Amino acid sequence: MKNFWLCFVPLFVAMDPLGVLPLYMGLIKDVPFPKRHHVLVQFFITASAVSLAFLLGGPALMRLLGITVNDFMVAGGILLFAISLMDLLTGEKKRRRVDVKTLGAVPLGIPLIVGPAVFTISVLLANMYTLAVTAVALLTNLFIAVAIFRFADFISRMLGTAGLRILSKITSLLLASIAIMLVRQGIIKIIQSSAV
């Protein structure tokens, strides 16, 4: 159970569904209410399929390219730090022009919820806590994201614009901290393996 939570929290921070919520509401404002269910189903299927495919195929791709897990920790940590820094400094996620028919898949599923941060963290977590635990944590987070989007109006009214922005900033700060931790651990392990 402990390993599950150690996977769940970083993935929740990386997905940041509460930070994406204002953008989601902007994207679906012209979508009729009955069709919003289709958007969420499309989102869950796409995000699950792509993230699990990367989770399964990522390590093999790394081996093919001669990339070690330690290399990936440093590079991934730097990438996560850059993503979190952009979110912290710019304040809002980028708005994109969308096609209502594919809204759930792109941009909602990929790359707003499942993007570079999730890809990076999921591969690293699978290496640390096993593939099965990471996959369960990943799918659980996607279910939670669906629930958050399903009750978007209620959550938005409850938290308000300021509350959503504050939560988004906090998750970005947590993501930056996780990024620094990954870089630190990666560098330490590279030095240790070089000294042997």
Image (cartoon, rainbow, N blue to C red):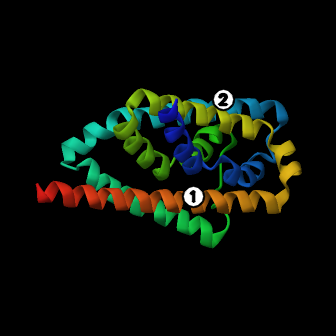
- Image coordinates of residue 40 in percent, x first then y, are 69, 33
Q: Is residue 28 visible?
A: yes
Amino acid residing under circle 2 = Val
SS category of the residue bearing label 2: helix
- Image coordinates of residue 33 in percent, x first then y, are 84, 35
Q: From this viewpoint, which residue is outermost toward the left?
A: 196
Residue 23: numbered disc: none
Residue at image location 54% in from the left, 57% down from the top: 175
Q: Residues within 10 Å of mark 1 (few under 14, many from 20)?
A: some
Is 100 on the left-hand or right-hand side of 133?
Answer: right
Residue that mark 1 sits on:
174
When asked about the image quadrant of residue 60, the answer is top left
Amino acid residing under circle 1 = Leu
Residue at image location 84% in from the left, 53% down from the top: 159
Relative to 54, is 188 above or below?
below
Position of the C terminus by quadrant:
bottom left
SS category of the residue bearing label 1: helix
Q: Is residue 110 visible?
A: no
Looking at the picture, tell me which residue is in the foreground, 95 or 112.
112
Residue that mark 2 sits on:
41
When asked about the image quadrant of residue 43, the answer is top right
Compare marks 1 and 2 and give the one earlier in the sequence. 2
How far is mark 1 from mark 2, CA to CA? 29 Å
